[in-house]
Amino acid sequence: MANNLMQFDPFNDITHFSPLRSFEDLFKDFRLRSTLGNFETEPRIKMDVSETDHGYTVKAEIPGVKKEDVKVAIEGNQVTISGQTKYETEKKDGETIVRRERYLGHQSRSFTLAHEIDDLKAVAKYHDGVLELSLPKKPGNGGTRVLPIS
């Protein structure tokens, strides 16, 4: 009986934005597919943030977004990353899309760091769907700056 114990986290569905997951699990036992399974949420920009005495390094995954469609804005200690993916307009005669799973549209994520960022020394690089930010710390107040991406 002890082998059947499961860890319960009441906030798990909320933090992963899957509030209906438990409801869907009811249907799995009956081998029925829930109509809620087609409900898809906007993909979240996943990122890692590390800190040193001198600054922050952020690595954010934004797959499928072209470099020119990625924007980074810094205002004080708040950083906003956004990206835009567009629909492919090429359609062949007699071709019908059966299923579309790739997300197309606007993604954005903002976060606040413990220290203000020196926006004049901040650097952004984008390669293979990963955005890497070098954000040096700065004392005092700064303005808003949009980073060029190389």
Image (cartoon, grey):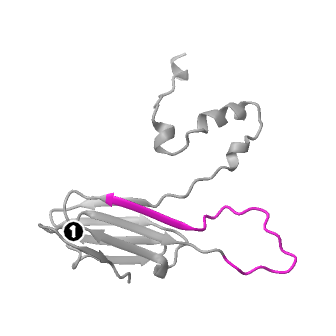
Q: Residue at x 77, y 37 (%)?
A: 32
The quarter of the image holding the C terminus is bottom left
Number of residue marks = 1
Query: What residue do we see at 28% from left, 72% from top?
Result: 134
**Of 14 and 32, the residue lying toward us:** 14
Residue 7 placed where, x, y %? 47, 28
Magenta-highlighted residues: 88-111
Q: Label 1 sits on what residue type? A: Ile
Residue at the spot x=23%, y=75% of the render?
A: 119
SS category of the residue bearing label 1: loop
Percent position (x, y) of residue 55?
20, 66
| Vertical arrangement, residue 5 with respect to residue 78, above or below | above
Badge 1: how crowded within 10 Å, few (<14), some, or many (20+)? many
Image coordinates of residue 45 in percent, x first then y, are: 46, 61
Drawn side of residue 72 relative to residue 100, left or right: left
In this view, the residue in front, 124 or 86, is 86
Residue furthest toward the top? 1
Q: Which residue is mark 1?
A: 117
Image location (x, y in percent) of residue 1: 55, 15
